[in-house]
Amino acid sequence: MAVTDFSTPAYNQVEVNMLLQRYLYSFFAVAALAGGAWAQTTTATTNTITQTFNLPAVGLASSETAQINVTNLAANPSTGTAASCTGTISFVNTAGSTIGTAASFTATAGKTDSVALPYSATAASGRTEIRGVITLTVPLLAAPPCNLVSSMETFDSTSGVTHSHITGPTATFGVRPTPVSVFNPGR
């Protein structure tokens, strides 16, 4: 009959620490994933979330118009759902209040949608600050390819000459982004 020596622990302290460390990493990984899911706003009937992108504030004078442009760079897949980005574009004043009403957009593959805000719509007297807000509606299930790039510009309302141009945020879902190479020999 074999005798078991219980005076020697089955695991040394290093092994116990490693097991505890693995357990804790696993616990925190699961907690982080669950926490990320709780942070999303979903609608039970539509299964969508919304993502809001704020563009920087720009000055707008009485002779200018501001415009936000959004373009879906995603290509239509050979099979499956066609590329599409859906959302709204709005402008807000210095108090954060929406100027006018938000404009809806649906940008299909390669399509650009633009929303303009003439100075007269701001109800301001003198130069004023505005900023753009893009709200993207993202389906949780079977999201269509969307690679939305955005920009905001101000231009002379009469001549159309651009005064400022801001590259906005990029939103991608449903596609694997393709790296883009930029070459600018003049700078």
Image: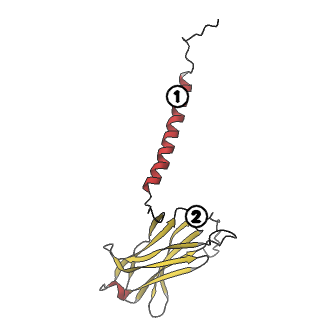
Residue at left offset 45%, top offset 76%? 89
Quadrant of the rendering where the C terminus is positioned: bottom right
Q: Position of residue 100 (x, y in %)?
A: 36, 82
Task: Judge whether 86 appears above or below 12 on screen.
Answer: below
Amino acid beneath label 2:
Ala
Pinpoint residue 96: horizontal percent, then vertical percent: 33, 72
Circle 2 Cα neighbour tier, 10 Å, few/some/many (<14 / 14–19 / ≥20): few
- The tag on residue 17 is 1
Secondary-structure class at tag 1: helix
Residue 10 percent coordinates (x, y): 57, 19
Q: CA distance from mark 2 to mark 1?
A: 43 Å
Q: Quadrant of residue 135?
A: bottom left
Residue reaching furthest to the top: 1
Sequence-first tag of 2 and 1: 1
Residue at (56, 13) in percent of width and height? 8
Placement of 101 over or under 157, stated as above or below: above
Query: Which amino acid type is marked by label 1?
Result: Asn
The kind of secondary structure element at disc 2 is: loop
Q: Mark 2 = which residue?
A: 142
> Tag on residue 179?
none
Quarter of the image with the N terminus is top right
Rate crowding at label 1 as few (under 14), some (14 to 19) or many (20 or more) other CA atoms within 10 Å: few
- Residue ID at (36%, 78%): 129
